[in-house]
Image (spheres, grey):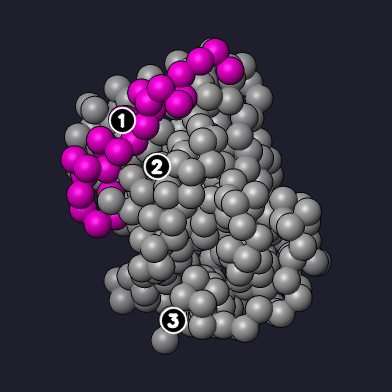
Amino acid sequence: MTSLAVTAAAASAPARAAVAAAGSNADQRNFLLARVRDAMLGTGRLSHPIPPPQLRPALGAAVRAYDNCQYGRLADALPRLISSGHSAGETAIPVLAETYTLVTRIMIKLDDQLGWIAADRARTLAAASGRPLVAGEAARNLAVLARRAGWHTQATQIALDMAEDEMLRGPAPTLTAERGLLVMSAAYTAAHDGDRSGMRQLTEQAAATAAQLGSGVLLRDHGGGFGPTAVRLHRISAEYAAGDPAAAIAAARELTPRSLPTLERRARYFTDIARAYGMWGRRDQCLEALLHAERAAPQETHSRPAVRDLVTSLLVSGRTSPDLRGLAARCGVP
């Protein structure tokens, strides 16, 4: 792990303080879910509505909070965006579609069924907005939900059909990048379906697309964006999902956390490494990667069901340590 995490050495004093103060972060997940649920169902009270001209800046702030794994801020920002967006009428449709896309992304991460409602609303609103990038992201998130439900054929069709849709045709780099994101989604579905060859073929297609666009990151607000670095990060999770943890760790060695565009992506990097090491049976390296993820993004790490499942497996599969027991307590794992 030393070579993998050279840029994420000992946490700074602020990071250590964040970890120490994060004991209630697991509760923040439930608070966030409750607030968003009430806003989506219209059962919550709207305080301080956002004026229509301020909806776009407010959404930008919410995306930055997501990128920085600040779930506490999202628990306030998302309900206000949902309620205010619905109240603002047709002019707010594009912002509302993007808001529901962001909500879907978070619900996927938190493994909550609200994601299905948010995804359906995002796709309907995206179609009404006529904006191709919004429609592409809505379809991509719906494909992720279908994959998680085990509907691999449908997930692949949703992603690849959208990648070939007329809305995303054209030479604009952002349209090409959105097509690349959709192809990567289909590749990850192939990995979960046990189709290692299909996964690698689609991943190479996405890599070729990224190479055409240069070394920068496009569509950064779309879950970390698209570019060569995004494809390399995708390879880690795709390889372990296809059952090859050694290939996942090899892919991880091609990246450094500092090269990733957002804090959320850096936390994803360490979590993916942990899952690969967990599959490989390398418990010490798995725990070390989880601790790096926690230092980078405590709220993200403590809130994700996937992380808590991994911590639970470490607790029951072998000896424990003070570091493991401490992490379990901070994640709310008994």
Between the C-alphas of marks 3 and 2, the distance is 34 Å
Q: Residue at x 51, y 36 (%)?
A: 130
Label drawn at residue 225: none
Amino acid carrying mark 2 in the image: Ala
**Quick one: label 3, few (<14), some, or many (20+) residues within 10 Å?**
some
Quadrant where the C terminus is found in the figure: bottom left
Between disc 3 and disc 2, whose residue precedes? 2
Looking at the picture, tell me which residue is in the foreground, 131 or 1: 131
Tell me the chief SS of the magenta region: helix
Report the label total: 3
* Percent coordinates x, y for residue 292 in the rendering: 59, 58
Q: Tell me which segment is drawn in magenta.
A: 147-172
Amino acid carrying mark 3 in the image: Val
Between the C-alphas of marks 3 and 1, the distance is 40 Å
Q: Which residue is mark 1?
A: 161
Q: Is residue 227 left or right of residue 240?
A: right
**Quick one: label 1, few (<14), some, or many (20+) residues within 10 Å?**
some
